[in-house]
Image: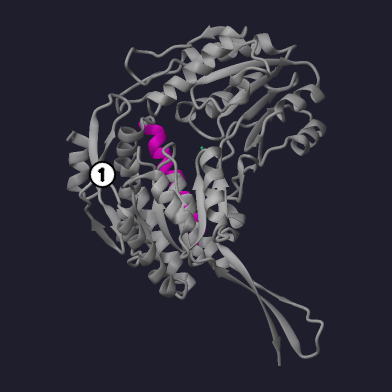
Amino acid sequence: MNNVSEELQDKSLFHTDLFIDGKWQSTEKRFSVSNPANRTQIAEVAFANETEIDDAIRAAHRAFVAWKKVDVAQRAKVLSRWCGLLHENKEDLGRLMNMEQGKPYREAVGEIKYAASYLEYYSEEAKRIKGDLLSSPFANAHTLVLKQPVGVVGIITPWNFPAAMFIRKVAPALAAGCTCVVKPDERTPLTAYAIMELGRRAGLPPGVVNMITGDPPEIGKRLATHPKVAKISFTGSTQVGKLLMRWASGTVKRISLELGGNAPFIVFSDADLEEAVKGLMLSKFRNSGQTCICVNRVFVHASVIKPFAVLLEKAIHALKVGDSITDYDLGPLIDESAVHKVDRLVRGACEAGAHLCCGGKRLKTDQLFYAPTVLKGVTPDMDIFKEEIFGPVVTLIPFEAEEEVLEMANNTPYGLASYFYTRDAGRIWRISKELEYGMVGVNTGSISTAWAPFGGIKQSGFGREGSAYGMEEYLQIKYVNWHE
Ligand code: SIN
């Protein structure tokens, strides 16, 4: 047991058991969670069996009967209190996240605030659920359109944002009147369990949010096939998303999927190059390159690629890599398979003719830190162009014409985030319309906010999170034909 976990235990924020029907529940079987920065074990966490998975679903189903009827002002109050508790405990939660996920502490605290912003947003949006009253073709009749909560939601969240992805789904679900069974990723369950405890303190009634960990395929399949679960919301790989879609089809469940990406970042010849490098660094190296909206392919107009590369090199040399709580920019990758994947893509690109400008290796043998890397001469036939890198690697690709770069940028089955830099207003409009992506950042590397609809198209999934659009995912329409 290390200092962080001991201190958090004293504050009752270090939880390793299942949370079902408002109670912490231990299990015989446990699995181990370790710190990716030094690979030491930090906890033994509960592993739910079939009965416990079903208990969580049943608890959520029972709680739904009452929660959907709780007045909206009361639901909003619970979200608002939970938001306050996240802010009050952000340093502790940040240290916990830093320890289990490896994200720099500063970024981890930023993620807690980002998560809290969804609670704040949906505590307000809860008050704005509106139906409709339409004209009726019949005399003395009314067509009412009601928006009602969909029911129990099975929520499966990833390791790269253990706080924000959990809250981004749960906040609109609760605001709409749904109840939830949440499965955080088994590599990073501690932050989610600590936030769950804060939800309990905020006044969530028993069963409204339940949290379980265990065997991911077993829990995923049970949630997606269980007749009492009305909807699945998942953030993770496209491969698992497809599996969940297949399983969910048996009971025709609603489903929202936020899956992999392959984000292009285009720098036109008239761009402010210093700003473009700042935007690239922000997007590319956030969470050490492990976000679904991270830049994957950097297209730079041939006339400015040299000065752009010089500025980029300078920014990369200034990055600090670290393994402690102190200030640093880049942490470890999540596990050994993540390092292998990044290394395979970099080596494959070099063997196929790309030029390694810097990095291209692990920082220390036997550790999960990968050096910030820049590759020039990447081409569309290379795996590094086609696959999501999920690591601190920049691929530089020159282009000459607008049509050419659009063709390359859209040449992927994914469609989550995209970015471009230009000062030409006509081009901003043209390119924004032509990019086949759910999100476009223009002259910015930052697009994430609770105020906007986050989500993708093509094989990056469907459904939106954030803004009023995010609330619609948890509401269903009922039409009432009322004759007087
Ligand atoms: C993600 O990687 O899926 C989430 C990133 C974000 O919300 O900014």
Going 38% across and 57% down the picture, which residue do you hit?
A: 82
Left/right placement of residue 231 relative to residue 5 reads right
* Rendered view: 237 above or below 256: above
Quadrant of the drawing holding the N terminus: top left
Going 32% across and 23% down the picture, which residue do you hit?
A: 323
Quadrant of the drawing holding the C terminus: bottom right
* Rendered view: 199 above or below 316: below
Do we see residue 43 in this rendering? yes
Left/right placement of residue 222 relative to residue 49 reads right
* Rendered view: 76 above or below 465: below
- The residue positioned farthest toward the bottom in the image shown: 484
Quarter holding residue 460:
top right
- The residue positioned farthest toward the front in the image shown: 250
Going 35% across and 41% down the picture, which residue do you hit?
A: 186
Give the extent of the magenta segment.
Answer: 105-123
For ligand 1, tell me if the residue under mark 1 lies within 8 Å: no
Q: Position of residue 433 (x, y in %)?
A: 77, 39
Going 33% across and 55% down the picture, which residue do you hit?
A: 50
Front in this rendered view, residue 167 or 350: 350
Front in this rendered view, residue 421 or 60: 60
Do we see residue 465 in this rendering? no
* Magenta-span inclusion, residue 108: yes
Left/right placement of residue 58 relative to residue 117 reads left
Residue highlighted by disc 1: 45
Q: How many marks?
A: 1
How was this image coloured? Answer: one colour
Quarter holding residue 52:
bottom left
